[in-house]
Image (tube, grey):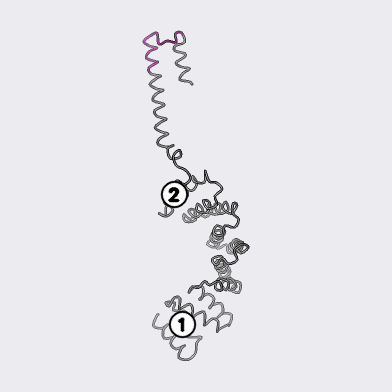
Amino acid sequence: WLFWQDVKEIFRKDATGPKTPQQAKIFVALVAGFIGFIFMITILAALFGGESSTEDSTGYYQRATDYYNNQQYDSAAYFYRLALIDDSENPELYFERGNAFLNANNTDSALIMFDNALAINPEHQQAQYNKGYIYFNRKSYRQAIDETKKIMNYAPGYTDAMLLIGDSFYNQSQLDSALRWYEGAYTNGYRSAILCHLMAYIYDNKGEISRAIGLYKEAIKQDSSIVDIYARLGELVTGEEGNWYRQKAARMK
């Protein structure tokens, strides 16, 4: 608009064209400047605006996924944000962006994303679990328990939640409460050397030796390299069997 006002001022006496060489020079300069300005805007738009004008949320999501899989979590979080512009009610996008932040050790931003996912889908198990996991890693065990227990209201068989709650109680030396949740995971069919070892240790401390021995044995079936279990079985088991465990522990040290 300003350009055309300048042209209008120059030719206000004669709209058909310049009357003097000076007017002609000014006219050419203004036209050249205007054309240059338009050219510059076009180039800048191509360089910086092309991405947003040609790519949709699906494209952004794919790029975010590629960056995430390549462990480039900051870039993944950026493209998840772009995908959310057109798909702002998708809890999975918030969840996955939260995971990108979590892997980049930006736990405050991760918590915000998980909360956003839960605001849309209050029964998003993984988002709720990840909140508990963050508080567990911060050693805020009471918060970890409170957050993770929410899952039990709609997914009482969620084994990972049981284990996280159990670990939170265990790290506070509340062994009876920890055992309750470990037993829940065990009853659900979860088996690992660590779980069996922890349960055996708790039963051992409670004086329930037969249950402890059974779980110690189950633990070394899962992982035969745990020297401490052989040593403990050597103390708890009598006769030749106990002697075998003691010798095995001595050879492994």
Q: What amino acid is at disc 1?
A: Ala
Residue 154 x/y as whole percent: 61, 62
Residue 19 x/y as whole percent: 40, 8
Q: Secondary structure at mark 1?
A: helix
The residue at which mark 2 appears reads as: 62
Q: What amino acid is at disc 2?
A: Gln
The number of numbered discs placed on residues in the rendered structure image is 2
Residue 144 x/y as whole percent: 58, 62
Q: Is residue 223 magenta?
A: no
The residue at 52%/71% (across/down) is: 190
Q: Outermost residue, right direction?
A: 153
Mark 1 closeness class: few <14, some 14–19, many ≥20 residues within 10 Å: many
- Quick check: 45 above or below 184? above
Q: Secondary structure at mark 2?
A: helix
Residue 174 x/y as whole percent: 60, 72
Query: Which quadrant, please, contains the C terminus?
Result: bottom left
Report, in whole angstroms, how far the alpha carbon at label 2 lies from the one at label 1.
Answer: 52 Å
Mark 2 closeness class: few <14, some 14–19, many ≥20 residues within 10 Å: some
The residue at which mark 1 appears reads as: 231
Of the two numbered discs 2 and 1 in the rendering, the one whose residue sits closer to the viewer: 2
Q: Which residues are magenta?
A: 13-28
The residue at 52%/43% (across/down) is: 86
Q: Nearer the viewer, residue 25 or 211?
A: 211
Q: Nearer the viewer, residue 59 or 152?
A: 59
- Quick check: 57 above or below 9? below
